[in-house]
Image (cartoon, rainbow, N blue to C red):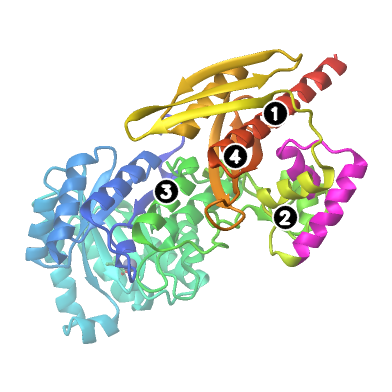
Amino acid sequence: MDESGVSAQNTVMIFDTTLRDGEQSPGAALNVDEKLEIARALEEMGVDIIEAGFPISSPGDFLAVQRISQEIRGCIVCGLTRARREDIDAAAEALKDAAHPRIHTGLGVSDVHIRYKLRTTREKALEQGVEAVKYAKKFVDDVQYYTEDAGRADPAYLYRVLEAVIAAGATVVNIPDTTGYTMPSEFGALIRGIVENVPNIHRATISVHCHNDLGLATANTLAGILNGARQVEVTVNGIGERAGNCSLEEIVMALKTRRDLLGLDTGINTCRLYPISRLVSQLTGIPVQPNKAIVGTNAFAHSSGIHQDGVLKERTTYEIINPRDVGVPDSAIILSARSGRHGLRHRLAELGYMLDDDQFEKVYQRFLRVADKKKTVDTRDLEAIVADEVQMFFEETYHLEHVQVSCGNQSIPTATVRIRGPNGQVFCDADHGTGPVDAIYRAINRVIGEPNELIEFSVQAVTEGIDAVGRVTVRIQADEPVNGAERRVFSGHGADTDIVVASAKAYMFALNRLIAARRETEKRARASQ
Ligand code: KIV
Ligand code: ZN
């Protein structure tokens, strides 16, 4: 029993091979520092075993296994070898500083591998495997044995190999469907057959390693678990040789989501799934397909009006996983021509726009026209639609009367502003900054004091030539909730032939909107008291 009272048999060990099989994906080459970064993230997420590489395959792989062994203390670090002494020597050397080292050795078991790849016989291959386990045991206690291409092997021969390598000291036996050939019922039966026919199987953990050539890696891995496997070999985003390996996030979330049926746990902190998916994609350069289960950008995005309406009424109508459980901030309502009024109203409210029915109807009709032309309507489009259709529906609380800046390559940028406040009072203040715009924004903040963060600043020339009018757009984020929306964003625009003045106007515009929205919140709060 562990601390949470779950029996060890009810826990499925997560063996991550992103850095070994995953890195074998065409085009995915990671340097040692990148591998270390991924290893740290895997450890933090709670994987049980990290297969850090194949030490004899290259000096880079050797170094990666060595550095990961030196740094990672919270999980088993594993190195792959063929069933050869020189491979095992290299792995033992690379793993020598690991807190929990494991050597993963093995050999093919299907006739096609034995005959054509190994050019040997079943008996000789069996002997070689046993020798390899015995040799690896001289260096580490924890030896895992892989029976390559087990999915296409003769089960009777596979049972003999497993019995012999367990007798020689293998602690884990890995049953790979190397070519992704089997069907779930077949692979499940293979594991069941091992449980029933290998006399000493209780002395080892059964691991499954499924490839995705027929898109069945996750289904086969689950079938393996259902029939007795208690270790799964997976990669982040399912990357790996050819069509890849079983995806870590899919198997972990299948076990978690259907715990009612399967009654099994993993040690994974699922909130780390999405961040690690991004990290691996970024470092390997392999994009995640948008519709990828669990971590694809569309995995929690709702586009049809009927679905949006359902999810907004009750998330579980169309979602079996809470996006926050996998580290995705929230479900996304994608506004498109198929979105209904409910979805649009929700998005507008998120942006802090509380429109009356007439205003909303105007915005909705305009939204439909825009959505017909564009695939999706984003926040900026919506803001432009609202600004156009509903005009300036906020009062200007502060008015910028005067702005003056002094800057140059030998001086500290300094700005002075004069601002007229709510009751006609006039405030003057000055500040310095890293540049003229920064100086202006600081001076304005000294007068207005509305806490916010500038999250976007862009300048565009709207006319041509040296006297072009510059249009500045800023987006600021309120530090405190406004109209019930956390960290609501307000945009502001300003145009002038002097872009410094345009910047000041844009910032004042956004600030006035923030202040008007806050005032509205306070008014509603008072009315509801
Ligand atoms: O797919 C496979 O058989 C492998 C082994 C080396 C474990 O990756
Ligand atoms: Zn593999």
Say which of marks 1 and 3 sits in front: 1
Q: Which residues are magenta?
A: 343-372
User: For the residue marked with disc 3, what is the amino acid?
Assistant: Ile
Label 1 within 8 A of ligand 2 by Cβ: no
User: For the residue marked with disc 2, what is the amino acid?
Assistant: Leu
Secondary structure beneath disc 3? helix
- Label located before the other in sequence (1 or 3): 3
Q: Quadrant of residue 493?
A: top right
Name the foreground residue: 410 vs 35: 410
Q: Are marks 3 and 2 in contact (CB under 8 Å)?
A: no
Say which of marks 1 and 4 sits in front: 4
State the image coordinates of residue 125 (x, y, percent, origin top left): 17, 75
Q: Which residue is mark 2?
A: 335
Cα gap from disc 1 to disc 3, whole angstroms: 40 Å
Q: Which residue is mark 4?
A: 502
Say which of marks 4 and 3 sits in front: 4
- Label located before the other in sequence (2 or 1): 2
- Label located before the other in sequence (4 or 3): 3
Q: Is residue 68 above or below residue 517?
A: below
CA neighbours of label 4 inside 10 A, class few (<14), some (14 to 19), many (20+): many
Secondary structure beneath disc 2? loop
Name the foreground residue: 350 vs 214: 350
User: For the residue marked with disc 4, what is the amino acid?
Assistant: Ala
User: For the residue marked with disc 1, what is the amino acid?
Assistant: Asn
Residue 211 shown left or right of residue 507 in the figure: left
Secondary structure beneath disc 4? helix
Q: Are marks 1 and 3 in contact (CB under 8 Å)?
A: no
Q: Quadrant of residue 199?
A: bottom left
